[in-house]
Amino acid sequence: MKVNLKIHLVLLLVLSSISFSYSQSLNKYYNEYIEKYSQLAQKQESEYGIPASIILAQGLLESSAGKSWLAQNANNHFGIKCNDWTGDKVYHSDDKKDECFRKYDNVIDSYEDHSNFLKSRSRYATLFELNKSDYEGWAHGLKQTGYATDATYAYKLISIIEDYGLHKYDLEQGVVTTDTKNQGSMGYISEYNKHKIIKNNKLKYVIANGGDTWGSIADEFNMSEKRILKFNDVQAEMKLMAGMKVYLQTKKNMASKHYPLHEVKEGESMYQIAQEYGIQLKKLYDLNNIPYTEGPKVGQVLKLRK
């Protein structure tokens, strides 16, 4: 009993700094990029049928939020190389030394060419059969059809979309319906909910908007605030920040089989990683034999499964 109380108190101390660290980790350059180019991404979705969330996520990832060498020197926001290209070119070392990349007069041309690039190539044709609200399907499809060589490319896109709530820019979004299967754990879910329900690790969650509180989301899904707080490993004192994941069910003991490991990035906390993969915070600490008073180290590879 004393051991459990000690663990509980230590975790409370760890969680007390989460709100600040989370707000700091949402890259201001990403937010500026989204504000600047979200309407352009929606225009591309309207004309070509590519989800705006996918366009923005790819632009953010490929161009480092517009700060990469290619973006700065060639207005190339999607890392498209010179294959079948008759326009201006630049040379830059990427997968290989001094590779040829397309150069554009402006960012609008880069977005337009990216849309044409996907729409005109037969290998991407199956993507356009997906619902435009299925950003996970698009992300995995882009990796499978060879857009990028990075084995974690799909995961990175999905993570960006969900961390920054990019799915709200999609013009065609899925409709939330009443869920009768999980009323025991989730309560009654109205078809008029303002938050879109998303799944991760077979768990249902929503992305917090500006002005949301733990209590307001609990009310929306006909649950007590105490349950929402318990599902998300937090205390009532922790402020809910826009962009945070809010689970509507008890998180799992480990991540899905697709994500056995995670390499810690700059600014990440154990709590953020636990939320990202739908794992209980204490279980993540225990899986990696990390004292509850410590955080992860940049570059450290964490186990997400036994």
Image (cartoon, grey):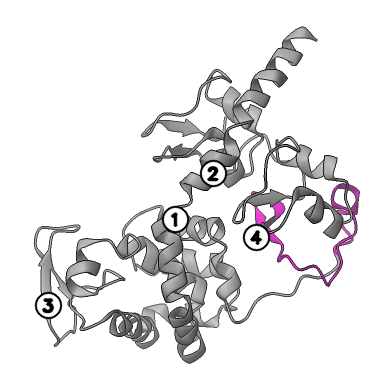
The amino acid beneath tag 4 is: Gly
Residue 210 numbered mark, or none: 4
Report the number of numbered marks: 4
Labels 1, 2: front one = 2
Residue 22 numbered mark, or none: 2
Labels 2, 4: front one = 4
The amino acid beneath tag 1 is: Lys
Compute the Cα span from label 1 to label 4.
Answer: 24 Å
Tag 4 or tag 2, which sits nearer the N-term? 2
Tag 2 or tag 1, which sits nearer the N-term? 2
Compute the Cα span from label 3 to label 4.
Answer: 42 Å
Q: In this view, does 149 lie above or below 306?
A: below
Q: Considering depth in this image, is 238 or 253 the residue closer to the camera?
A: 238
Q: Is residue 294 above or below residue 93?
A: above
Q: Quadrant of residue 81?
A: bottom left
Q: In which quarter of the image is the C terminus?
A: top right
Residue 89 numbered mark, or none: 3
Compute the Cα span from label 1 to label 2.
Answer: 18 Å
